[in-house]
Image: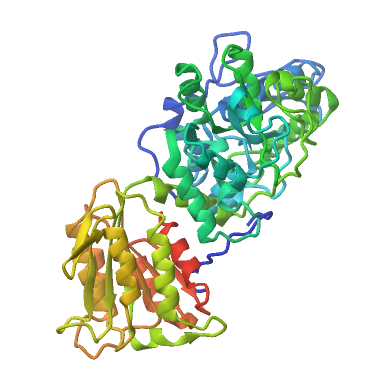
Amino acid sequence: MPNGRSSAVRSHRRGGGRRRTIAPWLVIPMALVLVGSGLTIGYVYLIKNACSGSTQATIVAPPTTAALLQDLAGKWAQTNPSVNGVCASVKIGVQETAVTVEALAHDWDPTASGPAPDVWVPPSSAWVKKAAAASETADRLLPDLLPSVARTPVVIAMPRTVAEQLNWPNTKLDWKDLLDKLAQDKSIKIGMSNPATSTAGLLALSAIIDADDNTEVDSTELGRVFQLEQRLSVYKSTTEELFAEYVAGQGKSLTAFPALEQDIVRHNEAHPDLPLVAVYPQNATTEADNPYLVLKNAAWTSKERVDAAQAFLQYLREEPARAEVQSMGYRDSNRVPGPKLSQNNGVVSKLTALPGGVLLSESITQTVNTWTALTRPTNMLLVLDVSGSMGSVVRGTGLTKLDLTKSGAGAAIQLFGDDAQVGLWAFSSQQSGKKAYREVVPVGKLNDDVDTDGESASRRDTLVSQLKELEPGGNTGMYDTVWAAYQTMQKQYVPDATNMIVLLSDGADDDQLQGLKLEELTAKIKAADPSRPVKIVTIALGKPENSTALAKISAATGENTYSSERSYDIGKVLMSAIFDVN
């Protein structure tokens, strides 16, 4: 699939953003303090012994993991560690995971991001996949081996009385069943944390979006994510904010939200009067595995620092460190629980479900983008090819390419909320007048009424009914159509929304009208008003060469083209294109 993305979502294997203007290490301090003094730069544990000289590795982790590592580093220092006769130590920097992901996407800037790390310990391997997918720079730094420091599964946090109605602690539900039951009980107040910044939110949504673990995301699974978004009572950036909301509301503002098992233990220790319990989905246990990533390929590190980092990792694998991990409410790297993981603390000791695999890098990206597309304002124009070639039957389906396109577009429209703005154009040389395109339904809110032939219906219903009326015929008059659509969407631009054109075609422009050429079209797009950017996401049907022109059109707006070579998966590709916009 040249210049495009696959629509498949697979599991269990490893495969820039803009630079922030506010230094994230100032917003979220590295909190580096020399133990036993008021000096800066690091939780430093350096015990002088018979070794000569010193070497120190810098480890960066988010606050909760950093607290664990700081405790372990202190105990390691008491063993008088050395590497090849050189005194070894580590300093633990505190930095939110999303900030580290962005910093690794570029050449690490100490001014903007704090001291460069020799080791990164994110809460989950999912963040490693996300970083690798976002930037080749980050991908080159990240190791293939992801040894776990500590594990804690993703669960649904619920008040004990609510969970017991679901037969807790013996609840036999998978993510799908759990969401279906929650959807039926309107008294349940569901919370969610942003998967772009929250580990629990990211891992829970990954499990929901591919609940059957079949490596594909279909319309039913997308519909379940849409159902979750529609039912949300509370939406926060982080899991910590959800717990704070629960406490502030005295247990009445929230009755179900994704969390980590270890979060439940910590919450119950701090708030025994507002206890929560963990409901464990039974189909697979998605875990925060806290991988220990030695960035040995980084230009800023050295063999001595890498050796110190490896020595500390070796200590973390030994029994005293494992016991310490368990004492803080985690499971060790082999999923073995400690004394805190008991029903008295709102959790269970034995996990009955097998650990789930971590999705591929592109799947993690799609998970975040899908949720973002559903939760942020959308202003979208569907532009569909209805030329004669779209009437050809797709082998093995008994349906035409246009039939499959209409079905996929109709399913996608049903996933948007009522406030989403959507419109529909059709294009071919047989449209009315001298234009190669026709406005079928103007762009507007899906819950607004639209008059068609003297009858009024919601724009959502009108779009679905008008899609069914489309018929194939004529040549492909594409380039003039794209430019007209682009101008229309710039005029109807919505600030802080996803402003996009989704264009689907099975061939290059073969209209007989003397219109724009491809190079003229892309030049016009690039020269258009930059204060009103509109994404053009294109989908090529049929032969790979059909995507060449479409790829250039999408690239002019910084987007990718998608491809459906055999056309039977048009609906799936259309879904991916709509819900995978950056």
- The residue sitting at the front extreme is 455
Colour option used: rainbow
Residue 398 image point, x, y percent = 51, 83
Instruction: Judge whether residue 556 can be spotted in this image.
Output: no
Judge left or right: residue 441 versus residue 417: left
Left or right of 371 in this view: 264? right
Q: Residue at x 17, y 58 (%)?
A: 491
Please give the name of the residue rendered at 42% of the width and 26% of the height, measured from the top-left corner: 27
Q: Can I make out residue 278 in this image? A: yes
| Quadrant of the image occupied by residue 151 | top right
Residue pictured at 58% horizontal, 54% vertical:
361
Q: Position of residue 577 (x, y in %)?
A: 43, 63
Seen from the viewer's position, the closer of residues 161 and 246 is 161
| Image quadrant assignment for residue 522 | bottom left
Q: Residue 66, position in %: x, y?
A: 61, 25
| Closer-to-camera residue (509/155) | 155
Q: Is residue 102 left or right of residue 531?
A: right
Q: Where does the image place residue 81, in percent across and percent down from the top left?
A: 79, 23
Residue furthest right in the image: 319
Above/below status of 483 relative to 285: below
Residue under the point 79% across and 26% down: 322
Closer to the camera in the image, 186 or 251: 186
In the picture, which quadrant includes the C terminus? bottom left
